[in-house]
Image (cartoon, grey):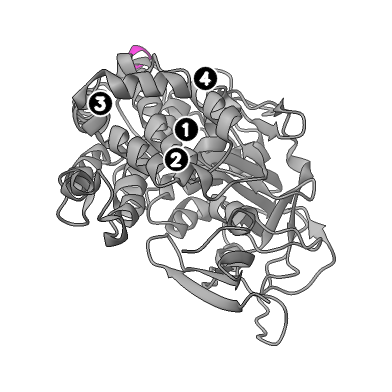
Amino acid sequence: MMESKNVKLSFNRVEGDLEIKVELDGNKVSKAQCVGTMYRGFEQIMQGRAAWDGLVITPRICGICGTAHLYAAVTAIEVAQKAKIAPNGTNIRNICLITEEIQSDTRHTFLMFFPDICNELYAKEKYYSLLMDNFEPFKGKIYKEAIENTKKILQIVAIFGGQWPHSSYMVPGGVTIPGISRHVSQSIPIVDNYIKWYESSILGSSFERWMQIKTLEDLGVWFDESNEHRKSAVGLFTKFGRSIGLQKLGIGNCDLLSYGSYFQPELWQPPFTEAHCYRQRGIFSRKENKVIPFKEENISEHVKYSWFKEYSGGKHPFEGETIPYYNADTPKYSWCKAPRYLDEPMEVGPLAQLVIAGDPLMNDIYAKEGSNVWSRQFARLHRLVLSLTLLKKFLNDLLKNRYEPNILQNPEILDGEGIGLIEAARGALGHWVKFQNGKISSYQIISPTTWNSSPRDSNEKPGHWEATLLGTEVR
């Protein structure tokens, strides 16, 4: 009979508090629990406040993705009041959101993920000395460069939004920023310098050459082309990560969900029945092996294993409750709810976003190897190229339309319901808000991490992360 034991792991490099508890049968994970250890409470904070208070309070939910929460909050208000939006306002929002995504992908990769592959357990591996030279926390060349360059690119959000983090420049109808030309002229050199750094240190090649990579085989050809490619950050991660088997760990078995990224300014207007995004909205169905339409009404939240007041099955966020109920003597084990789509867990994040958007490289990798530790992290490194290119387009488009207004006036909201669905750097983010007599009567938020780190639901189905741990061999 195999020995069984419980192991608890605490994670200190995430936005909030997270623990993973696993049961081992022998050396394999037989049960996993993702434990959200912090009660947030923003849903209670928002009740009874003025309709626009969400624009100031919800960006404080997350220090690294406040722009995303602000974008979701203002979108919920605009959907509720059918507000007309100045296209320039949408473009400026996109500029700030994609800038935040760029810093998040960079910091997540080099400050949060890569320290783990510098572990001395890998000291005998072929590329370990190069890894330490580049990624060792506080000392590595690229580790320090990532801090410096992300500080600089965030200046773009401050230029347009006044500050970062916790900005509040988005309001119904657009943004509060006067003038455009000076802001764009200040921002373009910052983007150009970031691209130069990314090409030289992270890729070891030009964006043009990188965008020629359409398949996993193309990536192998690119790797073998030059020493610069092999010793770049992407080259090291690809070779080292795959040599230690990251492509065989954390295998995802959920469908993929994306709310779509970056509304197209001229098309995102009332009645908001269709999301016109630069990266499309949808569900990738593993059963049908294709992207299928997304329907917001299919979302529900379960609380059977969450420390909230019990209700039967799952509830749509507009009908949902967030009433804390901690009791250590129950099977509940997390402060996260369990969001589901058609009662199924979903995977969200850069991989899901790019597969659904139809990116050739990520679609090829996903078709051949699925969702795993390597492919999910590689998606961030690849997305940075796409997003830096898109950021330059947004800035140039804004300059062309610099004489157009940045905001349109709309009547104040009194009553209604609004939904703000956007893609934060870590995946699908949603705000569901009810308004009554100019006040917020209900506010529900489902963040990307809630989708991925959710506990089991009323049907005993584990969340994405929990499922990826099952069967993992612990050495």
Label 4 sits on residue: 360
With 136 as the anchor, is 442 left or right in this view? right
Identify the image quadrant of residue 80.
top right
What type is the residue that disc 1 sits on? Gly
Dot 3 crowding, Cα within 10 Å, few <14, some 14–19, many 20+? many
Q: Secondary structure at mark 2?
A: strand
Q: Position of residue 387 (x, y in %)?
A: 39, 28
Identify the image quadrant of residue 187.
top left
Q: Secondary structure at mark 4?
A: helix
Instruction: Select label 3 or label 4 by which is in front.
Output: 3
Please tell me which residue is depicted at 77% across the width and 53% down the height of the picture.
316
With 290 as the anchor, is 381 left or right in this view? left
Label 1 sits on residue: 174
Q: Are marks 3 and 2 in contact (CB under 8 Å)?
A: no
Q: Are marks 1 and 2 in contact (CB under 8 Å)?
A: yes
Please tell me which residue is depicted at 45% across the width and 42% down the height of the picture.
374
With 99 as the anchor, is 448 left or right in this view? right
